Amino acid sequence: MAAAEEPVQHTYPPLDLESPQLTIRAILTGMVLGAVLSLCNVYMGLKIGWGFNMSITAALLSFGFYSALKKAFEVRDWGKLENNINQTAASSAASISSAGLVAPIPALTLLTGYEMELWQLILWTFSVACVGVVVALGLRRQMLVVDNLPFPNGIAAGETLNEMYAKGSEAIARVKALLAGALFGAVMKLAIALIKIPNLYLPGALGGASLKNLTFALSPSPLFVAMGAIIGIRAGLSMLVGAVVAWAIVGPMILDYGWAQPGKPDGVWFKNLVTWLLWPGVAMMVTASLTSFAFSWKSVVAAIKGTRKRTEVESAGPEDEVPRNVYIGAVVGILLASVVMQFWFFGIGWGLATLGVLLTFLLAVVAGRVSGETGITPVGPMGKVTQLTFGVIESGNVSANLMAANVTGGAASQCGDLLHDLKTGLLIGASPRQQAYAQFFGILAGAIAGSVGYMVLVGDAAQLNAMWEDKEWAMPAVVQWKAVAELFAKGIENLPQGAIEAMLLAGSIGIVLAVAEKRAPKKVRTWIPSPTALGLAFVIPAYYSVSMAIGGVIAWLLFTKKAAWAKRFVIVIAAGVIAGDSLTGVALAVLKILGVM
């Protein structure tokens, strides 16, 4: 494992309440950009089970747009804090895909044939995202100021905003780099789709399975390489190690033991193996996250009681937060609405619905910490914990198993997203209260646009079933949610053989690594694999981890050899590649549905 730098200890600037922030144009710009970018994440979520923070993309695009307007019509300058509100709203809208659109909702349709109408999708995804917002506001001070978690997407967006407003020409150069990355991502996506460039599966075999069966390949898509550049070398190489352990060691073992069944001899066996591998992967992520958070239990308890004096570090953060009475009212109203909708739409009992919402608070803490350390919010794994809980309580209720878990997973995603946005705000002196309001506007736009996009891509049950059989739509997130729901429809005793022992072992490893991260000497600590990234590699195909490791290494080499250039452009270009690839994918899907392709 390559050495990684310690998180940067930032000195936060004073709060700026004089400059324009929550303006009408900032909100509208964020909602429009977020609506478009939400289509990227809906597409990527259905295709590959992932979504991305779109903060930098939204910030740069808006800067380029208003710079052009200023030259043409002499409009007022597009301020940094306005842009921050824009990126906050846009990123929250873009992450609406994880509120159920790319996993539990299609899984419910595949299992039961139940089809949600558009208005139901909009109301449901909006309510789920709102739960995540109120949870994040409660965690803000502990995770951002006290623990000073890196939240890499937030740091990247904050540094981007600071640099682009320090040098106008620099901002334009970064916009051009973003657009160049987007063009490259789009061209590659078109080439892969039109020329049918396949994954380059690695030769060789392990036991009775080929490396192709075990999902080891080099992908022609730059998408995951770009993602690896964003999360960095430590997380990327940790995922590669996790992929080797999961798919090259454990995978053949469970096939030999008969705990998982092989697929077609020349096929990729992801769907066959992940229904077993997800259990140790989830266990490792959960135990590692809770262990890391446990080191701060004293300050958490004191913060809840409101009796602890703030340290100099804590006092450095902005204090313009959502008023306590407004926050408490929002928490009560939103949580009540979530319970009502679970009962109304899916017939989930009041007690079970309430339990699912309460469990969301605990698991959002886990998701926030994972996202803070790696930049990736484990939406699916957090939902699996709720599925496991309801599998024990009411094993035969598929709707409760999926949709109560939907609340947990979707809320955890929004929680992580807002914490990244608030990290950006800390770095530029923005008001967390105004950012919180922008988040609500953003998820409204995302709920509308994302739900429309889902209806276009997926349509009815017949179209979804056709996609399910199409190898071009792997839908790994749907695979996992559907498998767990099917499992618990027959009771927890039907967990795959050996899964409980694997969960205990992986969970113990997660605890050990998390403790080592906290207690090991600084020089040793930087070489310790990330347990959250290791666990994540168990629930995605190995070729994703391979590509992300390559991206992390490339970024590390660039930062080592060309530090000044890399600091300016690596994250920006990577964000552009992600946006170009995914938007082109959405367009291709629409054309295919219309019969043009």
Image (cartoon, rainbow, N blue to C red):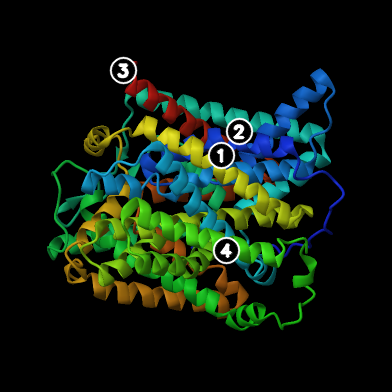
The label number, if any, that marks residue 595 in the structure image = 3
Q: Is residue 589 left or right of residue 6?
A: left
Front: mark 2 or 4: 4
Q: CA distance from mark 3 to mark 1?
A: 29 Å
Residue drawn at the location 16% of the way across and 41% of the way down:
266
Where on the picture, by quarter, is residue 71?
top right
Q: Amino acid at mark 3?
A: Gly
Which circle, 3 or 4, is nearer the viewer?
4
Q: CA distance from mark 4 to mark 1?
A: 21 Å
Disc 2 element: helix
Label 4 packing within 10 angstroms: few (<14), some (14-19), many (20+) = some
Residue receiving disc 1: 445
Q: Sequence-wise, which precedes: disc 1 or disc 2?
A: 2
Amino acid carrying mark 4 in the image: Val
Q: Which mark is residue 331?
A: 4
Residue 520: in sight, yes or no? Answer: no
| Chain-order first, disc 3 or disc 1 | 1
Residue 457 spot, x, y in % from top left: 36, 32
Label for residue 505? none
At label 1, counting other C-alpha atoms closer than 10 Å, the crowd grade (few under 14, some 14-19, many 20 or more) is many
